[in-house]
Every structure is written in structure tokens, then in C-alpha cells.
Image (spheres, rainbow, N blue to C red):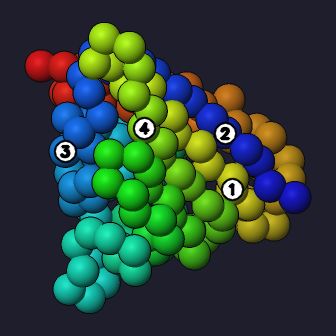
Amino acid sequence: MSVRIRVCTTIDAPPPAVWDEVEHIERHPEWMADAHDISFVGSRRSGVGTEFESLTRVGPLRANDVAIVTEWEPRRAMGIVHRGVVTGTGRFTLRRKRGGRTRFCWEERLRFPWWMGGIVGERLAKPILKRIWRRNLRTLKARVES
């Protein structure tokens, strides 16, 4: 079993401007409150195959997230697979809207280990993560629009 979380926002900027912020994985902690200390494994910094680790903090809980980029379509989508304590997949999508705007969506399918509560932990975490990620998208929106 896994938990599916999806949050979206509309950003008053075209997809290339939004991508210019999102493609820099090393800057994600600047707009993601739950991501800290991103470090790359190997020399790749972008594109499919880029691997990185990040300390993820949600309240008092901390986990090391190991992620590998599995999809990289500039100005359209970025996908990753999580291979840390919490496993699953994540995906950012950017869709052009009228008036030079972008619909940005963030979707994750996550699986928690038994010692983090398994299915029960996933269900308890969903509203918390959704609230954090909505705040993250507000921060991203403000960064891109400024």
C-alpha cells in the first residue's frame, strides 16, 4: 500500500520561468520547508540519472531521502524515485495556462516502513505532508513571481 498526495498552484509566470527555479535541485531547500542539506551522489546535477540525498524533517521526525531523477522534460516535468527510509515516486508537472501562467502540480506516492507505522503512518502523515507541501508551493510561487 502507499499514500498518494497531490498539491497544485497557479504561478503568474510562464513555464520556462518556473522551470528555471525548479530545475536547480540544490536550491529546493530554499522553497521546501521539509528538505535540508541536499548533496549529490556523483557528478550529475541535472537530468535523468541524477542522484541526491536530502535530510527530510517533518516536526521531530527526520529521515534521509535518497532520490534518483527518472524523468526530465525541461519546462514540462521532473520525476524521481525515492529509495531512502520512505520509498515511492514523486513528480512535478508544469502546464502552460492562459495569460502566460503555469499550473504547477506536485504528486507523490509514498510507502512508509513498518517502524514508521506502515499504512497507519501513511494515513496520519498525508494531511500533514499536504499542508507542508501547499506551503512549499506558496513559497515557490512567491520566489518565481518576485
Disc number for residue 94: 4
Q: Is residue 33 above or below residue 1?
A: above
Residue ID for mark 1: 110
Number of numbered labels in the structure image = 4
Task: Give 60 or 48, whichever is nearer the viewer.
Answer: 48
Task: Report x, y in % for residue 144.
Answer: 20, 28
Q: Please name whichever residue, 100 or 114, is drawn nearer the observer in this view of the structure.
A: 100
Q: Position of residue 31 (x, y in %)?
A: 28, 37
For disc 2, the marked residue is 5
Three-letter amino acid code at the position of disc 3:
Asp
Q: Are marks 2 and 1 in contact (CB under 8 Å)?
A: yes
Mark number for residue 25?
none
**Does the image show residue 28?**
no
Question: Who comes first in sequence, dot 3 or dot 1?
Answer: 3
Label 3 sits on a secondary structure element that is helix
Circle nearer the N terminus (2, 3) = 2
Q: CA distance from mark 4 to mark 1?
A: 21 Å
Question: Where is mark 3, residue-wise?
Answer: 20
Of the numbered discs 3 and 4, the one sitting upstream in the chain is: 3
Instruction: Name the residue furthest left.
Output: 146
3D distance between C-alphas at marks 3 and 1: 26 Å
Residue 141: quadrant of the picture: top left
Residue sitting at 51 percent across and 34 percent down?
A: 105
Q: CA distance from mark 4 to mark 2?
A: 17 Å
